Amino acid sequence: MANNQHAAPAPIGGSLVNVVTLSCAVLIALMVAVLAVRFLFGLGAVTGINDGYPWGIWVVVDVVIGSAFACGGFSVAMLVYIFNKGEYHPLVRPALLASLFGYTLAGAGVIFDLGRWWNVWNMFWPGSINLNSVMFEVAVCITLYIIVMWIEFSPTFLEQMGKHDARKKLNKAMFFIIALGTVLPMMHQSSLGTLLVVMGAQIHPLWQTPMLPLLYLLTAITMGYAVVLFESCLASSAYRRRIEMQMLTPMAKVMLGFLVVYLVVRIGDVLVRGALPKAFVPSVEALMFWLEMACFIAPLILIGAETNRRNPARLFLAGVLLMLGGALLRLNGFLIGYETNIDGAGGFTYFPTLAETLVTAGMFAIEVLGYIIITRRFPVLPREDVQAAH
Amino acid sequence: MSTRRDFLKGVLASGAAATAGVVAAPARARETKARPPEALGLLYDATLCVGCKACVAACKEANNNPPEFSTVDHLWDTPLDTSGYTFNIIKMYRNGTMDEKDQETNGYAFMKTSCMHCGDPSCVSACPVSAMTKDPVTGVVGYNPDKCIGCRYCVAACPFGIPKYQYDSPTGRIGKCELCRHRYKDGHYSACAEVCPTGATLYGKTSDLLIEAKRRIALKPGERAKFPRGKLGGPDQSYETPAGKYLQHVYGETEYGGTQVLKLSGVSFEKVGMPNLPPDAAAAMSETIQHNLYGNLIMPFAVLGAMTYVARRNVKPDDESSDKEEG
Amino acid sequence: MGNMNEIFDTSRKTLQEIEQRLEMPRREFLQFCATLAVTMGLPAGAEAAVAKAIEAAKRPSVIWLHFQECTGCSESLLRAEHPTLEKLILDVISLDYHETLMAAAGHQAEAARKDAMKANKGKYVLVVEGAIPTKNNGIYCKIGGQTAIDLVKECAADAAAVIAIGSCASWGGMPSTGPNPTGASSVAEVLGKPVVTIPGCPPNPYNFLATVVHFLTFGKLPEVDKLGRPKFAYSRLIHENCERRAHFDAGRFAMEFGDAGHRQGFCLYKLGCKGPETYNNCSTLGFGDAGENNWPVGCGHPCIGCSEKSVGFEKPIHQVARVLNVAPPQQYPRIVEEQGKAASFASAAAVAAVAGAAAGAAIMLTRNLGLSHAAEEAERAKDAGGADKPAADKAQV
């Protein structure tokens, strides 16, 4: 509720030129160079994707995993506005910022990967759309959500630009925007999982289930909180600010709640479908499955106890592990467990090329650079009176 | 202040919204679609195939596709599989000493790989922009490059690995067999069937082809029988030859609800690269999920309504002036 | 056979005349007509039309010009065996002017040409052999004081048809290869309009004869491709009908002259055979009436692409050809083929670097957070147990 209890957000200030921002700039420049080659000579000129693996890391990491990492805004907004936990309000803006970047870049990343990008308008053209397509649903929801998020975040810019009237008007409708901002991610994050269903037996049984939408939605929410833990710790450490432990500790508990629900559904599903024996066949898939499960289960041990949740190191680690777990769930489903020729007889190999990796690295660099610039110049992080901004 | 009660209210509201959505759109499965009654297709009989690859060359010519090279000296059109530029290919199964044709051990066999024109195609279900469509009459799964955005979801979705993207081009298209539908207006039919010297690839209505396939697998191995060539229902080009040793399985009769291209073989289908598929199409499952969750947007709107209601109560403008508003 | 009967029924008399005129038995004459009809790819029965046309004894006047050439085309024509060419040129056609073959010389010869042109104005056939020099107003080739350019223009003006025989007349041939000191050009270039071309060095005489007889029979020249070559002879690559094609498809090549593969008659592609980029019918129509296999590839030498512009006399003989129509070979992909690139050192290193950097940063951050937390805890003077925990965390990472 009363947000004004908390310190109002304020720009951090400080120089924009340092080792981190310069490294980001270099990575971004490399990405632009690779993309120039890609748009001039085709996807095959820079990526390792082929007839057997039509989707590489540009889809799986940049879009599927990238957008899940960007669920912080959605998860926190849901906690604050839907579950009415006003005390988490200061987390909203930074989380929303990370989400904004994550999603906007995921949207841009889609364009890099689209083989016939100039036709993309068909996605929104009533004569072309295919309501049966999961991809259509994902694309439309993500696009809408990006717009919604920019509106949600616009008060930050309006504040900075001194347009208070516009801000007030916007505030009147904000509740609806926020509601949209929770429903849209629910829709497309679950649908990102449904994307795999139509691939049928090409997806390894450990990752192919009608429960995919629920699994992806639950992990997206969990990852959202995990990202907030990660980002809060990182921002505090980088800007030498106090960690907001009074918020992170209880939020971690909410996160664990979602995690437990996920694990119950996930393990139950694998058991009910009888896919578990596949996890004991010595194979890359089985190894990756256990790695993924370990990343999901470890946080329970790590921060299961209330006292442990007060330790920022453990919170941070749990956050990282959950992000990794969610990322692995997606990577395993879309790449490791994917096989064009069914029955393990596929002759295709895929490994991201150097150029391909550079683009993904560049995307994350844009995100980091953008985050630094905006937090230093716009009111995002709560004002801290005690310590001067670095 | 936020209280446990408010929190519970939020939980209840969202739970109710979800339930409302589920109730409003009761789970109803989208059945696997059958082929259209007048569906066109091919019957490939591996026991008749002599591996001349006339169909491979004819397909390239009919679709105006360039050669693809996989040997060091770029002399032959040597695609290893179907690709953005190769819509039809004859592959060879080899085992041991390769003594006899259509024999699983110490034998060899040919297999044609091209689009199966599924009754319920995954690629059509997957395509977000209706660039992949199934003709309601002929059932031909066609591609429209003017709509295609190149997302390659169809490539990932197809269980036979048929639609393929042209990765080497900045304006690459998806390439796949369209049963030579562009040649129908000149009185032609599928080039592969047109040129096949032994009738191993036969063109016709799938319903007729299925009867023909059933007739063949009922033949005793070695029994002399007539085999049509070219097009079923076209000019009679049939010839007499001993029947092969058929597996008692018409591939494509029931796979994924039935495909329009049917196959006969002497070697188990899995060994010649034809996946073992259930009678229910993956597209049916995917669309069942999709429509139950989003059918008519009932569920999303229900959830949105509930969320709006809750958010309306909980969202406090960031302005200091709005303290007194009740929450 | 019905057509044969028709011929015998209706024109037994004329056939007898022909027999006398050509000094060729009737049977042999009909074989000759059939050969020409087959060369042109005419349907069964067309030999009757050919025979009738030749019988009709309306011998077309032919004027034959020689420019920059070796007379090889004429020489090869002389070696056509059925019938012997002297019969043909004297009796089937009326060769009114041919510098090598005509008895007349000097002014007499030129007068014969002029007379023939006048007498058959608009009806004679002009055949040009050899390239035409165009540099310095064409002074490098003069006959009777006239440059080649003038001659060809003068003769072409009233001709019913112009046929360029040999590569030189068709596209410049050997005289036109670099540095081309005389500016040797083709007939079509000099006349500024397309003409029928029979390229080859020399061309198969039957391709020329069939063209002339086609003109005789149907009153028009045969269908030609965009380079003016009759389609009946030049529509397919030598490679497509080559007797050694099976070796190409199976990947069996002679690697050097005289090696085991060469002696076994393997494909000559790797010795530089230009068959895959040369349109001609050498591989189906034997040369010089000496039986089949009597052509360069048949006797073990790669085709040099003599009839193909920018191949013959330009590409070195050993240089391998560009395969114009690539077809599948006699080999099959397996059911499953390995495709796609595995991790290269650079790509694996990049992924490892990213993962390593992320892991390293995470470990460092965890440690720092743990340490500061421990410090805070210590500050609060709680029990010392908290200080151990960061160490435990590190171990878990």
Image: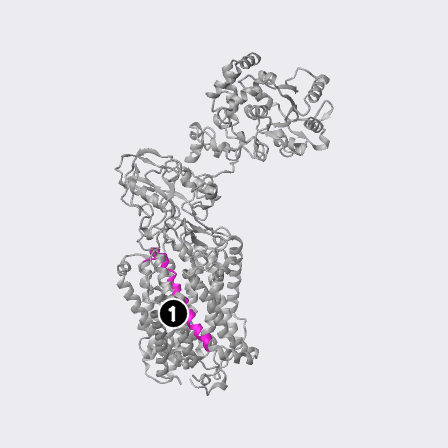
Q: Main secondary structure of the magenta part?
A: helix
Q: Position of residue B25 (x, y in %)?
A: 35, 67
Q: Nearer the viewer, residue B226 or C347?
A: B226
Of the residues shown, which amino acid type is indicated by label 1?
Met
Q: Compared with residue A289, is residue B16 higher up or lower down, i.e. above or below?
A: below
Question: Label 1 belongs to which residue?
Answer: B299
- Identify the subunit bearing mark 1: B
User: Badge 1: how crowded within 10 Å, few (<14), some, or many (20+)?
Assistant: many
- Quarter-of-image position of residue A136: bottom left
Decide whether residue A195 is among the magenta residues.
yes
Q: Is residue C304 visible?
A: no
Magenta extent: A175-204
Residue extending farthest to the front is C10
Residue B231 forms part of the magenta stretch: no
Q: Quadrant of the C terminus of chain C?
A: bottom left
Question: In the visual, does A108 lie left or right of A132?
Answer: right
- Residue B197 is left or right of residue C79, and the answer is left
Coordinates of residue A311 in the picture (x, y in percent): 36, 77
- Which one is in front, B306 or A103? B306
